[in-house]
Amino acid sequence: MSDTATTDTRDAAALESNVFDTALVLEGGGLRASYTGGILNVLLEQRIFFDFVCGISAGSSHSADYLSRDTKRVRGSFVELAASPRFGGLRTLMRGEGYINSSYDYAGCIVDGSMPFDWDTFAANPARMAIQAFERDTGKTVVWTKNVSPETDKLVTSANLVGCVRAGSTMPFLMKPIRVDGKMMYDGGLGEGAGLPTHLAEDQGFRRFVVILSQERGYAKELVSPAKERTLRRVAKNFPFLVDALLTRPVRYNAALAHLRMLEEEGRALLIYPDEMPVRNATLDYPRLAESYEMGHAQGVRELPRVLDFLFGDGDAGRAAARAAGVLVDPVDEAEAVAASFPQEAFDAYQAETKTPELLR
């Protein structure tokens, strides 16, 4: 993956955004991103291109893949890639690579070609992006951006992008943390917003938001039990800021979610909750993840009229405005779109390359 952006095989105009007054906000959630990826791909398939996208944790991966406009990778990063034993599980945990092997999942899979990243398109895309991480030893929220500000624009090389997305997606105890600029980083969900990155868009002046969430409507995080608190304080006793972030996260998350509901009531946010979330953040079962993606994609198609109404207005005038912006207002065939995102023959080739009899477990 080169650090030099080229557009010789693409029309630069095709990378222009067509939604400027509304931010796309992506919650994380580990492998629950298999479901939200289905919704996200509907936006790409219908040519709905936001000029600003922000995400936390798995949402930061989705943000990068959205700006690279790669529907195969949006799906593959949380479905096909997770089917490889190199992605994670007890074997990688026993080898000291973490239950989720972030070294392979963010960089190794690009290097070996299993899940390439289209850096050229990402770099050439004029849209803006913001992600964040949590600094373990200070408790600070660190924000990294693309096309936003010289002070925060760190996502300017492929190595920086991969490192920052990985650092900001590192779930404590499941994944090995890495240092960025000499600071040990963990999942951005431990920082401001507690997993909901709305503030990253608000900080850029946005007042309207399309938010793709990874928990069902009505969800609220439960307070940490006394027993779990004792365990956290013992296991992470040398990292008081990490402990505090973990203990206070439920209250902070629920407050951020209440803020989103207020924006929704004011008509300033379109919240897309999963109708039913079939997987957990550390699910590694390929058939379940593939089903999760397909469920998300089907919901994305159902949500399309609501998205178009919110972004361009309802009725014939709204659809005309969407068409004028280059949006495909009629949904593509669902089965064809799902297959096109990661064709079976591509996955068959992926299986052959891994040469592992237990690929689907």
Image (cartoon, rainbow, N blue to C red):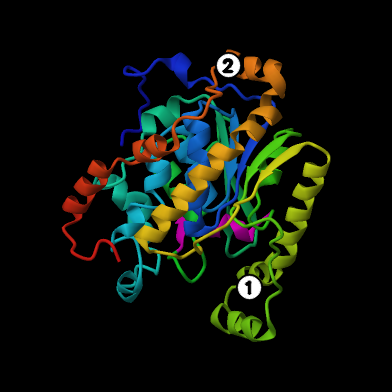
Question: Percent x, y for residue 89?
Answer: 35, 69
The tag on residue 360 is none
Whole-percent x and y of residue 118? 36, 34
Q: Nearer the viewer, residue 15 or 304?
A: 304
Q: Quadrant of the C terminus?
A: bottom left
Residue at 71% in and 68% down: 248
- Give the structural element (helix, strand or loop) at label 2: helix
C-alpha distance separating marks 1 and 2: 50 Å
Q: Quadrant of residue 288?
A: bottom left
Q: Quadrant of residue 301?
A: top right
> What is the secondary structure assignment of the residue under circle 1?
helix
Does the magenta portion include 187?
yes
Q: Is residue 203 among the parts visible in the rendering?
A: no
Task: Relative to 290, say whether 244 is above or below.
Answer: below
Q: Provide residue 20's location: percent of width, then percent of height.
A: 65, 24
Residue drawn at x 34%, y 50% is 107
- The three-letter amino acid code for the residue at tag 1 is Val
Q: Nearer the viewer, residue 116 or 312?
A: 312
Q: Position of residue 32 (x, y in %)?
A: 51, 57
Query: In the image shown, does 16 or 237 lie closer to the viewer?
Result: 16
Whether residue 329 is in magenta: the answer is no
Return the residue at label 2. 323
Quadrant in which the N terminus appears: top left
Tell me the magenta residue range: 177-192
Residue 25, quarter of the rendered image = top right
- Estimate how packed mark 1 is, as few (under 14), some (14 to 19) or many (20 or more) residues with alpha carbons within 10 Å: many
Residue 54 vs residue 141, the one in the foreground: 54
Name the residue beneath numbered marker 1. Answer: 243
